Image: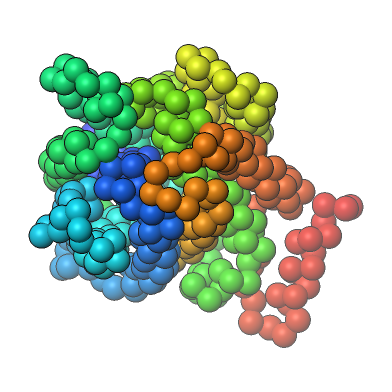
């Protein structure tokens, strides 16, 4: 019996694939962590205006994602370059050209420029950036089922991908800390060195240019080292140990053409909605906590501005360390129970924040809980999405696009609701910020974790499974009915 590792993806190709989302991760780290901080605390935008910019970006991303997913599945790509890598290249160029303008002062604007003018100026750059971000994300995720077919290898590849996501976040926060540190060394006025304001525009501009430069190099490595191909031959998996690398297709049978699912067929799959709800809940926890952690540190705990770099840094260092045990842990406990373990850590963070309103330096302990918990649930939710797609790689981009649509719209609407309900109507934060951001951190972690737990329960009761497609009248309905009643017998 041949060793199952012979069919594994070579180490260099695993590495080159894993860094293909690095530019996106660098930009996403700045987008979610510092967008509201930059536009509200630095440029002085009103809460609702800052929320509108983030909402516009999320809606643009949400709309572009399924459309790009559909086109990515449908179009052949640029010659022999591959359809996924072609879309990845288009997305990368769009991000590189637009992102530096988002974290910079409006060109030609001054202190007397109306905020709606600045809002109009930034909107096109945000839309272009989100289009590029979506194109890169969907094409990169869609490569997972095409590069590997083994379930545990998919988890491993997803874990490596997330490890570089964490490295990207660590890079952003480390560079941000260095820039704030050098700024502190140059000035003696606490009002400047401790509080955010217009003086910090060069810091965020320099950070965005650094992000774009580093990300471009890693994108080049991805395009040079990753070879896109079609579905792997079934014979590759023949003889593999079923406990380690089970083939997704039966080696002795050829699936009929009707077994291939196109985008409209996914809408009739119950597991599609189960995984979509779980993925949306996961992203709400990860993204909203990342968005509001800086506000919580600045206005609730009243910590110096360097903490908006050091606390997220601790979070993602913890997540990075935990990402390497995802594969053995998921093999031991299963993906669902590993996800549940991550939820317990998120709930522990939420309870700690709720009960300790003046934690001060103890916030580092909560950062570890949130970092490890977020890493765990994100990797497992992506692994479940790859499991849902299975051998249906011809429509994999649509599935990832649809999952991302629910995530982006939910995040954008969530941020807009939070910004609209903000108790302070002026540009300067009022005393109401103290309790407001305190409870926001509790709700966006613990509250959404309850929703994620309910979604997980549906998967435990009705495991992820594709209902076979059959054109005969009544057959699909009978299979679907059996899908939801078999757990009772």
User: In this orientation, does residue 137 appear?
Assistant: no
> Residue 395 appears in which quarter of the rendering?
bottom left
User: Which residue in the rendered view is the most extreme toward the right?
Assistant: 489
Q: Give x and y (percent) for residue 368.
A: 50, 21
Residue 186 versus residue 79 in the image, above or below: above
> In terms of depth relative to the viewer, which is nearer, 159 or 292?
292
Q: Which residue is drawn at the image coordinates 22% and 48% (left, top)?
A: 103
Taking the image as shown, residue 177 lies to the left or right of residue 155, namely left
Taking the image as shown, residue 196 lies to the left or right of residue 113, namely right
Q: Which residue is drawn at the image coordinates 48% and 41% (left, top)?
A: 430
User: Which residue in the rendered view is the most extreme toward the bottom?
Assistant: 473
Q: Give x and y (percent) for residue 54.
A: 38, 56
Q: Which residue is drawn at the image coordinates 38% and 59% (left, top)?
A: 49
Q: Which residue is drawn at the image coordinates 78% and 73% (left, top)?
A: 478
> In terms of depth relative to the viewer, which is nearer, 180 or 137?
180
User: Which residue in the rendered view is the most extreme toward the left?
Assistant: 108
Residue 212 versus residue 170 in the image, above or below: below
Taking the image as shown, residue 357 lies to the left or right of residue 71, namely right
């Amino acid at each position: 019996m041949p060793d199952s590792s012979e069919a594994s993806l070579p180490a260099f190709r695993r590495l080159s694939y894993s860094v293909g989302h690095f530019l996106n991760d660098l930009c996403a780290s700045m987008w979610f962590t510092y967008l509201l901080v930059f536009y509200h605390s630095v440029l002085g935008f009103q809460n609702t205006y800052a929320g509108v910019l983030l909402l516009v970006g999320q809606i643009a991303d949400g709309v572009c994602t399924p459309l790009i997913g559909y086109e990515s599945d449908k179009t052949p790509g640029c010659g022999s370059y591959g359809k996924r890598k072609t879309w990845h290249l288009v997305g990368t160029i769009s991000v590189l050209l637009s992102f530096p303008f988002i974290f910079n002062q409006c060109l030609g604007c001054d202190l007397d420029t109306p905020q709606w003018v600045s809002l109009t100026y930034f909107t096109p750059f945000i839309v272009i950036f989100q289009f590029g971000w979506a194109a890169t994300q969907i094409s990169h995720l869609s490569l997972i089922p095409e590069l590997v077919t083994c379930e545990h290898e998919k988890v491993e590849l997803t874990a490596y991908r997330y490890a570089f996501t964490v490295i990207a976040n660590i890079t952003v926060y480390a560079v941000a800390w260095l820039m704030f540190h050098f700024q502190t060394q140059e000035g003696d006025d606490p009002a400047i060195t401790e509080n955010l304001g217009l003086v910090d525009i060069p810091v965020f501009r320099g950070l965005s240019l650094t992000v774009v430069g580093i990300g471009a190099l890693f994108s080049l490595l991805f395009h040079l080292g990753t070879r896109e191909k079609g579905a792997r031959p079934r014979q590759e998996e023949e003889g593999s140990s079923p406990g380690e690398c089970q083939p997704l297709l039966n080696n002795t049978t050829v699936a009929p053409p009707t077994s291939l699912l196109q985008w409209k067929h996914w809408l009739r799959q119950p597991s599609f909605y189960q995984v979509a709800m779980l993925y949306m809940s996961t992203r709400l926890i990860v993204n909203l906590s990342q968005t509001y952690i800086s506000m919580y540190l600045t206005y609730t705990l009243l910590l110096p501005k360097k903490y908006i770099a050091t606390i997220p840094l601790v979070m993602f260092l913890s997540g990075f360390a935990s990402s390497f045990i995802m594969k053995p842990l998921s093999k031991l406990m299963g993906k669902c129970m590993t996800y549940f373990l991550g939820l317990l850590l998120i709930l522990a963070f939420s309870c700690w924040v709720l009960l300790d309103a003046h934690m001060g330096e103890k916030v580092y302990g909560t950062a570890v809980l949130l970092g490890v918990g977020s890493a765990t649930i994100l990797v497992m939710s992506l692994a479940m999405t790859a499991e849902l797609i299975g051998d249906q790689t011809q429509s994999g981009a649509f599935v990832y696009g649809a999952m991302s649509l629910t995530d982006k719209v939910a995040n954008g609407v969530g941020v807009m609701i939070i910004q609209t309900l903000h108790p302070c109507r002026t540009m300067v934060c009022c005393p109401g910020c103290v309790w407001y951001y305190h409870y926001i951190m509790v709700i966006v972690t613990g509250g959404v974790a309850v929703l994620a737990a309910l979604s997980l329960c549906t998967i435990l009761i009705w495991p992820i499974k594709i209902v076979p497609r059959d054109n005969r009248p009544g057959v699909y309905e009978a299979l679907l009915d059996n899908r939801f009643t078999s757990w009772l017998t």
